[in-house]
Amino acid sequence: MKKWEFFKQLTRIFSITVMIVPVILGTVAAYAVTKEFHWFLFLVTLVGAVSAHIFSNLINDLWDYRNGADTKAVELEGDIATHSAILTSGKISEKRLASITWGFLLLAAVCGLVLTMICGWPILVLAIVGALLAYFYVAPPLKLGYRGKGYGEMAIFISFGVLPVLGAYYVQTGEFHLTPLLLSFPIGMLTTMLLYNHHFLHRHADAAAGKNTLVVVWGEEKGLRASKFMTALAYVFVIIAVAFDALPLYGLIAIISVIPLYKVYKTLSDKENPTEAYLPLFGASQQSSVLCGLMMVIAIFIQIWTK
């Protein structure tokens, strides 16, 4: 039990739903076209995607610790750390964490190679792009999430939206299509908001460590307005998906997944809020992302059954 609790803390395994749902969404979208489902390919895709996600979490912890962002989040009064606290608490050595991190990347790479041998070289391209985005989100020399130009948000949008949905679709069908691309936009944007909104919790520490997230660059007031705008944009993408027949008309039901976020936004002042006020926003972001994806999956299943 202690090992399992440690593993959960180390990997932040609670967050893997935002990777599992896009893989399921891409797979179901493929089944709607081919009426075929390849269990083995799906399982390898899922294991590879989850391993890549955990690698992303761990490499973030490793480099945020090395860059001083995690330490500042612990030291500065008023900020709330969102990392695993494995390194800052001394529960594991930096060297040991690095070995585990590369182990998960190796597992993801093995899955990618298996899928490449079966499904073709485009899977290898997607896997390499995903690995590079995950690594350079915080690692030098690129440190995409530290530049305050939106590069980090774009990396998350691609890594947690476009790549898993498009990749899962290709694995099942052997081709790319506009449908999975459109389906990836809402869930990709909402998962991006999960990472974006968590920056409100340690914005002062990020600024002190030189981590220039958009929240740091824009400030709290403008950053919160941007959060609301990008959330609205995610649901515009749902409407676009319906307009282009990627989703049936009743797929618009996915819009109600905005409710968790809407409820939290109503409690926040437009000007200034205590750091603790953003904790519910962090949680609501994950809820809305997962709910939106699942509702789109259900809509596609209903479409399949009623044809």
Image (cartoon, grey):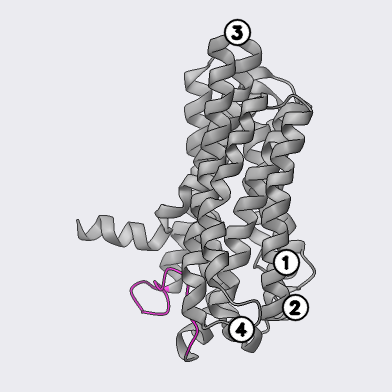
Span colored in magenta: 78-93
Amino acid on which the number 1 mark rests in the picture: Ala
| Residue 297 drawn in magenta | no
Which residue does the image show at 53% across and 31% down from the upper left? 24
Q: Which residue is mark 2?
A: 218
Name the kind of residue labelled 2 in the image: Trp
Q: Residue furthest front?
A: 266
Distance of label 1 from label 3 (alpha carbons): 40 Å
How many marks overall? 4
| Quadrant in which the C terminus appears | top right
CB under 8 Å between discs 1 and 2? yes
Report the residue at 42% width, 68% height from top: 84
Mark 2 or mark 3, which is nearer the start of the sequence?
Answer: 2
Mark-to-mark CA distance, 1 and 4:
14 Å
The answer to which of marks 4 and 3 sits earlier in the sequence is 4
Q: Earlier in the sequence, mark 1 or mark 2?
A: 2
In the drawing, does residue 105 fall left or right of residue 223? left
Q: Residues within 10 Å of mark 1 (few under 14, many from 20)?
A: some
Q: CA distance from mark 3 to mark 2?
A: 49 Å
- As drawn, 203 above or below 237: below
Prevailing secondary structure of the magenta residues? loop
Secondary structure type for disc 4: loop
Q: Does 87 lie within the magenta span?
A: yes
Question: Looking at the image, do the residues carrying marks 1 and 3 touch, with CB atoms under 8 Å apart?
Answer: no
**CB of mark 4 within 8 Å of CB of mark 3?**
no
Residue placed under numbered mark 4 in the picture: 272
Which quadrant of the view contains residue 254? top right
Q: Position of residue 228 (x, y in %)?
A: 67, 62
Dot 3 corresponds to which residue? 307
Alpha carbons under labels 4 and 3: distance apart: 51 Å
Q: Foreground residue, 245 or 174?
A: 245
181 horizontally vs 60: left or right: right
